[in-house]
Image: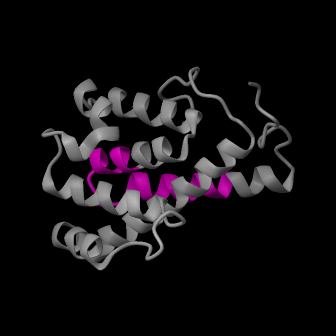
């Protein structure tokens, strides 16, 4: 399977400009939010797994490892409910991520229970950042899946 196109192939193209805005918005959340960095990485990794985005799954699993996350936790993100290595706050964020990512699969969207659980662990600013991060990674994943951006070759730090 080869990538269908390179969204960044022509840096002056409208799509490349828009994609850079997505990247910039994500970088703002990742660098400036008080949401714990480990939680951020778990969230984007889990959404990427659900969406089947090989490129983003590659990026975020490697970035998490590079940041000191254990291989056990990285490997268990896909089975977080059946594991003991995540905090209650991380579990709440992962549940919100799953429900926010699977909106089309869950007729009611994000449940009040999942929202209330996340609100127990995160303040309003952190919840806002979490919502933005989930939305941005889902949009980014969809771009990667549509153009068949492949995973495997990413090196931590490659994107700046």
Q: Which residue is at a point 16% across and 72% down the rendered structure image?
A: 120
Q: Which residue is at a point 47% across and 59% down the rendered structure image?
A: 101
For residue 140, above or below residue 34:
above
Q: Position of residue 138 (x, y in %)?
A: 54, 55
Over which residues does the magenta segment extend? 20-43
Question: Does 143 lie within the magenta span?
Answer: no
Q: Which residue is at a point 34% across and 63% down the rendered structure image?
A: 96
Q: Which residue is at a point 42% across and 67% down the rendered structure image?
A: 131
Give the quadrant of residue 14. bottom right
Task: Mark yes or no: residue 112 visible.
Answer: yes
- Looking at the rendered image, the quarter that the N terminus falls into is top right
Task: Mark yes or no: residue 67 visible.
Answer: no
- Looking at the rendered image, the quarter that the C terminus falls into is top right
Which residue is nearer to you in this view: 121 or 75? 75
Q: Position of residue 72 (x, y in %)?
A: 23, 27
Give the quadrant of residue 89. bottom left
Q: Position of residue 130 (x, y in %)?
A: 37, 63
Q: Report how many numbered discs are placed on residues in the image.
A: 0
Which residue is nearer to you in this view: 160 or 44? 44
For residue 82, above or below residue 15:
above
| Left or right: 139, with 10 as reference point | left
| Left or right: 94, with 158 as reference point | left
Coloring applied to the structure: one colour
Question: Does 36 lie within the magenta span?
Answer: yes
For residue 1, above or below residue 128:
above
Which residue is nearer to you in this view: 147 or 157? 147
Q: Main secondary structure of the magenta part?
A: helix
| Left or right: 120, with 106 as reference point | left
């Amino acid at each position: 399977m080869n990538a269908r196109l390179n969204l960044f192939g022509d840096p002056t193209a409208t799509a490349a400009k828009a994609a850079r805005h997505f990247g910039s918005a994500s970088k703002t959340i990742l660098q400036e939010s008080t949401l714990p960095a480990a939680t951020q990485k778990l969230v984007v990794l889990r959404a990427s797994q659900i969406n089947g985005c090989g490129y983003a799954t590659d990026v975020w699993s490697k970035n998490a490892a590079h940041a000191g996350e254990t291989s056990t936790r990285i490997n268990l993100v896909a089975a977080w409910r059946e594991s003991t290595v995540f905090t209650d706050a991380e579990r709440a964020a992962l549940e919100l991520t799953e429900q926010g990512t699977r909106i089309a699969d869950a007729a009611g969207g994000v449940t009040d229970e999942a929202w209330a659980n996340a609100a127990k662990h995160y303040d309003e600013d952190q919840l806002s950042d979490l919502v933005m991060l989930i939305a941005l990674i889902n949009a980014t994943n969809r771009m990667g899946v549509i153009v068949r951006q492949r995973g495997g070759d990413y090196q931590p730090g490659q994107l700046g």
